[in-house]
Image: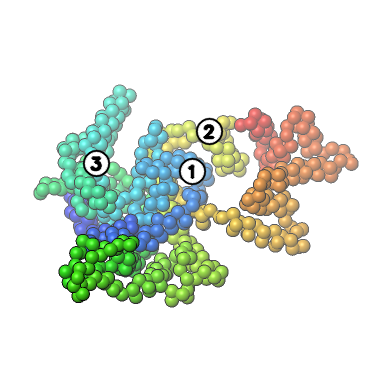
Amino acid sequence: MNHLITEENLWGKYQSAKDWTEKWSSHFDEYERIARNEAPSDVPKQYANVSDGTTAALIRKTPKRVIQQLPTGTVTSDDDNDWLPIVAEFILLNKILPYANSGYDLIQKFWNTLENGLTFGGQAVYTPFVEKNGEFTTDMVPIYYGDIFFQEGKQSLYSCDYVFMRSWWQPETIDQIIQNEQELAKSAKESGEKYESSWDIKALKKIRDNVTTKDEQGKTASEEANDVTGSGIEIVACFQKGIDATFYVGNPAGEGKAGAIVRRKKNKDPRGIIPIDYFYADVDGSNPFGRSIVELVGGIQNMLDGDMRAYKFNRALGLAPPLKVRGNVDTSQSFYEADALIEMGSDPNNDIEPLSVDTTAIRDYASIYGLNKSQLLNLFNSGGDTSIGSEVGNPGWGKTPTALKQQKEVMSTDDNYLRKNFESFFENWAETAVNVYFAEREGVEELQLDQKTADRLRKLEREGKLEKGFVNDDNVIQINYSSATPALHFRVDASTSKLNGQAEQLESLQLLLEIAGNPTLTQLIPTKNLAAAWNKIVTNSGVEDPEDLVIDLSDFDKQNLDNGMAENAAGAMSEEQMIIEALRERGVPDEVIRRALEAEKNGMPAEEILKDIERLMNGR
């Protein structure tokens, strides 16, 4: 298959993508300034160097409200393999998510992703395959907007056939790569194997000293604010779509020299997709970065900032106005002070008078500020601010129950939109992470499973969909990563990134119990289910000592077991009852007996049932 990027056109394509992308991000410095609540550099010196901060507060608070926990979901595969999605789901939860913490915890990186999405329109993230404390896994690395370059002419990352990502390395980073590759080659030679590295050691040594200063696009806001001159070796990675397509890593051309390629690596992802995903806070169908909320509200925010600075200046004039002096007066005495005496001299024309400052702007400032702020919040679709009343001229804002409910509904709609966009992005990233994990791992691993995953696999064994003994008695399986793995897919369970509040859960549970009170439904709903609903109400009620009110659901299982035995108590014992009594005499708990009977009804062989009982009795 022919791929678009080759060694011959690599650096030309990079320069075209760089020029194209930087045109779209030319206003991002201003967006970032507003999002960081920083005053512009051209504030008149007589004005206070402050900003209102409404937009900055919304951008900082919204992600924490929208993402309250990592989403959950399910893994599926492209073929009829039933066990692989189960194992992949276990690996995602236990081998990928806990280790995807380079730089910051994973949820902190997701909060930052949403902040940048609201500020610039979106956020790109890279999914590398790394080694952490002996554990090989995938990670999640946000990419600074100045270091991601889209294919020229494309309107979104997902429509790009190739993407460039830039990073800045220090010489010791290259030294570490060279040393690691040499050790791997030596180890392979000693064991009689051949090691094929994707790195070009000679090229790495040549670029080791190519340290340059970051360009303006590559400097972060913190580096700019603190006048930090960032420097390093400019490293560019080119990712292109296609199964077995070549990924290139190198140092671009400088001072008329040709760029150097230091790595060539095949795309092992069975989907043929690049390991970069993108979160879009909003889209407009033309800007590959997405639609920035700051672009919409920036003008009003700047007006709020300007009015605040002018108000403070005008307020200062009103509290201590300039003085008009007539005649020959000693101005050293002309200051405001309680019981002060100002020597005016003998000339009757001498006079000191405060300058009259117009107070109209000060008097109307509160209502003008409130109206402008409500317009900003309307653009942001946020109903989180209840400090604005309808008297400012916007009837959509107020403090009545109806107005507050309306504002909450607006905020919930906007939060839900952003949450759905995030969950769609999380689907893409998690799918990339699990596919890269299986594609990059090599060799055979003995994988220790949890009980839930082991039981799911044993069920496949009983159904004949998996060979017997795939899961051993200790819940361990052998998995060969070197064999070809089909493409895997991940789907988020809707709205699982949101935590339901106690009040919301109580309201929903109480409504369920009211519905369950219908005489017809009462005959259909098991008593155990009603008891479970009662337990959840108690848990979310906030009462002291809730454990005193919780119903033990295991009592229902024991009661059902005893009732089943009592049905035949008048006659001879059935075979099932004889088994129950025999197990009880051996000290087997009723819960274990119930599980064994269910397993028998589901067709589990007797020897497997006995092993299961033994495991439960031994607490394994």
Q: Earlier in the sequence, mark 3 or mark 2?
A: 3
Q: Residues within 10 Å of mark 2 (few under 14, many from 20)?
A: some
Numbered label attached to residue 169: 3
Q: Are marks 2 and 1 in contact (CB under 8 Å)?
A: no
Numbered label attached to residue 93: 1
In the picture as drawn, the residue positioned furthest to the right comes out as 570
* Rendering coords of residue 587 (x, y %): 75, 30
Mark whose residue sits in front, 1 or 3: 3
Q: Is residue 171 visible?
A: yes
Q: Earlier in the sequence, mark 2 or mark 1?
A: 1
Residue kind at label 1, given as amino acid type: Leu
Mark whose residue sits in front, 2 or 1: 1
Question: Callout 2: helix, strand or loop?
Answer: strand
> Foreground residue, 364 or 460?
364
> Foreground residue, 602 or 365?
365
Q: Earlier in the sequence, mark 1 or mark 3?
A: 1
